[in-house]
Image (cartoon, rainbow, N blue to C red):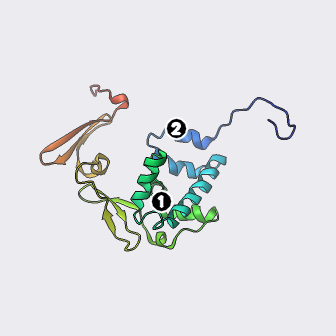
Amino acid sequence: MNLDTLEYELQGKSSFPTLELTKAIDKPIDRFKVLIGGKDKAGELYRKSLGALFAYVSHKVPEISDEVYKIDDAMRAGFGWENGPFEIWDAVGVQKGIELAKDAGYEVSDWVKNVETFYKVNDEGQSIYVDKNSGEYNKIPGQDAFIILDNIRKNKTLWSNSGAAIEDLGDGIINFEIRSKMNSWRRSS
């Protein structure tokens, strides 16, 4: 409905250059920097929404949980998010997230202002999170029973090309990973 004439008319198609730019980015977590950098209405929406989200979740530690990873886990499990709010905040940068919150008219909790990053990967390839009270990084529990390949790729890759990689998992075990589209395998020329 056209609100000026109060007549029904066909809906026009909207196009946002910012959203078009993200189509070429495979991992959703890598899209957020592009989304907040957009100069159109989509970019403005993402900047305001993420600024409000970051301010909100910063004040919910310790009300909801003392550990940031539990809030991220809850958002992924309960709402089907690909990444939790603190993971998204890390993707755009902690200081940039604080700026987004201020620009949107919100203030983040004081404990966040001294945080460099909410998550890191330790030397053993395990994810660690920042403790709100001490500022130290603690290991996320439950990682001893499995290996997170994303965490070991940086320093344990023995060989790789555009379609595959071999990673050292330790104890004489290697992982052969096919990275091509649809996991297809072809001979390199």
Q: Secondary structure beneath disc 2?
A: loop
Residue at 55% across / 58% down in the picture?
53
Q: Position of residue 77 (x, y in %)?
A: 43, 47
Closest to the observer: 64 or 11?
64
Give the image location of residue 11, x and y in percent.
Answer: 74, 32
**Tags 1 and 2 touching, CB below 8 Å:** no
Instruction: Give how far apart the Cα atoms at labels 1 and 2 are.
Output: 21 Å
Report x, y in % for residue 121.
31, 58
Residue 93 marker: 1
Mark carried by residue 122: none
Image mark for residue 23: 2
How packed is label 2: few (under 14 Cα within 10 Å), some, or many (20 or more)? few
Q: Amino acid at mark 2?
A: Lys
Q: Secondary structure at mark 1?
A: loop
Q: Categorize mark 1 by other alpha carbons within 10 Å: few (<14), some (14-19), many (20+).
A: some
Image x and y of residue 67, in percent: 39, 63
